Image (spheres, grey):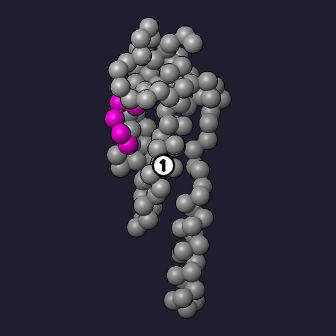
């Protein structure tokens, strides 16, 4: 292959990957809500913490931060039913494709 073809193939691969969502919602996870960071929700029982991670970079390619955030939330929501939690709250901002969430049961 000529260098131009290799470059074109690499660009097509990066563009194709950038639109992919690799994380899918697990059964029961759609009932788990994510609330904004801040004070703990009133009247809720703490069920634990969830730490999740995804790839923030693919080689030299930096993934879209919004897509990374969405995937982190989906992964966290997937963990909610196992903790008997119906509400998650981020404990920090995503950093290097990782984020922590507090898990609560609010009985909504």
Q: Is residue 107 left or right of residue 90?
A: right
x, y (%) of residue 105? Answer: 49, 14
Binning the other alpha carbons within 10 Å of mark 1 as few (below 14), some (14 to 19) or many (20 upward) gives few
Q: Does 95 appear above or below 74?
A: below
Outermost residue on the top side: it is 43
Q: In the image, is residue 92 part of the stretch drawn in magenta?
A: yes
Q: Quadrant of the N terminus?
A: bottom right
Outermost residue on the right side: it is 27
Looking at the rendering, the stretch of residues picked out in magenta corresponds to 90-94
x, y (%) of residue 48? Answer: 40, 20
Residue 99 quadrant: top left
* Residue at the (57%, 67%) spot, across then down: 15
Taking depth in this image into account, of 51 and 37 the one nearest to the observer is: 37
Residue 52 quadrant: top left
Q: Does 94 appear above or below 41?
A: below
The tally of labels here is 1
Q: Quadrant of the C terminus?
A: top right
Name the residue that disc number 1 marks.
66
* Residue at the (59%, 50%) spot, across then down: 21
Q: In the image, is residue 57 part of the stretch drawn in magenta?
A: no
x, y (%) of residue 43? Answer: 44, 8
Q: Is residue 69 left or right of residue 94?
A: right
* Residue at the (44%, 51%) spot, across then down: 65
Q: Does 64 appear above or below 31?
A: below
Q: Is residue 101 visible?
A: no
Question: For numbered disc 1, what is the local secondary structure?
Answer: helix
Q: Is residue 59 left or right of residue 70?
A: left
Outermost residue on the bottom side: it is 2
x, y (%) of residue 33? Answer: 54, 26
Q: Does 13 appear above or below 50?
A: below
Which secondary structure type mostly characterizes the magenta part of the structure? Answer: loop
* Residue at the (50%, 28%) spot, across then down: 34
């Amino acid at each position: 292959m000529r260098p131009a073809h290799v470059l074109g193939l690499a660009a097509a691969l990066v563009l194709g990957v950038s639109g992919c969502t690799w994380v899918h919602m697990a059964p029961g996870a759609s009932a788990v809500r994510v609330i904004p960071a801040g004070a703990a929700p009133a009247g809720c029982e703490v069920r634990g913490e969830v730490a999740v991670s995804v790839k923030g970079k693919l080689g030299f390619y930096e993934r879209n931060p919004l897509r990374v955030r969405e995937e982190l939330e989906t992964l966290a929501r997937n963990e909610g039913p196992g903790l008997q939690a119906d509400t998650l709250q981020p404990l920090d901002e995503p950093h290097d494709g990782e984020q922590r969430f507090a898990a609560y049961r609010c009985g909504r």
